[in-house]
Image: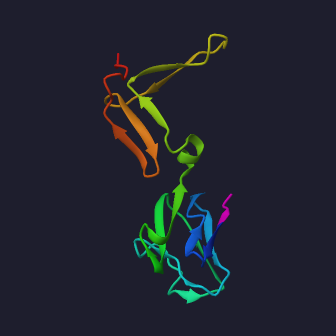
Amino acid sequence: MPATTAVSVLTAPDIFSPQTVTVRIGDTVTWNNPTTGIHNVFSDDGTTFSSGAAVAGPWTYSFTFTTAGTFGYHCQLHGAPNSGMFGTVIVLDAIELAHGSDMTRTWAARPIATGSASSPIRRTKWWSTRWPATRRCSSTGWTRRAPSSSSPASP
């Protein structure tokens, strides 16, 4: 179920609070400027999202994130990418939410036994790739790297 995350635009000092928020794909982030301070919300890449020109508050601006990734933003009058009045939105996909953004799993062309000694059913799963590798889930998606010397060998 999509959710809304609030970010406050604070005038003294010129900051976004919280500076970093983590949301899911489909969630909406709403920036709220309750004062008469002159600010805006502008994505660091200049194209993903923008509240428009910097104007005096009060105002709110909302954006719904539809792709996973890390999105930097700043106030054009009081900041720049990663400097001054800036912030970051981290958007996680379903795999990252279910398993954590630092999840790793070793994949190899060999059977992996499942079940336990006390279980009457023992199943075998085959994870097949061309060569043993580790796949790592991160905020940018799945990556593949060569196995280390400590990785189990294929049969």
From the top left corner, tell me how far across and down residue 155 is, in percent.
35, 16
Q: Nearer the viewer, residue 42 or 120?
A: 42
Which stretch did the figure color magenta?
Answer: 1-5
Residue at image point 49% right, 41% down: 102
Q: Does 103 lie within the magenta span?
A: no
Q: Quadrant of the N terminus?
A: bottom right
Main secondary structure of the magenta stretch: loop
From the top left corner, tell me how far across and down residue 55 is, in percent.
56, 89
From the top left corner, tell me how far across and down residue 114 is, in percent.
56, 20
Residue at image point 43% right, 40% down: 136
Please say if 111 is above or below 46: above
Q: Nearer the viewer, residue 31 or 99?
A: 31
Q: Nearer the viewer, residue 133 or 16?
A: 16
Residue at image point 51% right, 85% down: 52
Please say if 52 is above or below 146: below
Residue at image point 34% right, 19% down: 153
Q: How many marks?
A: 0
Q: Nearer the viewer, residue 117 or 120?
A: 117
Q: Does 3 lie within the magenta span?
A: yes
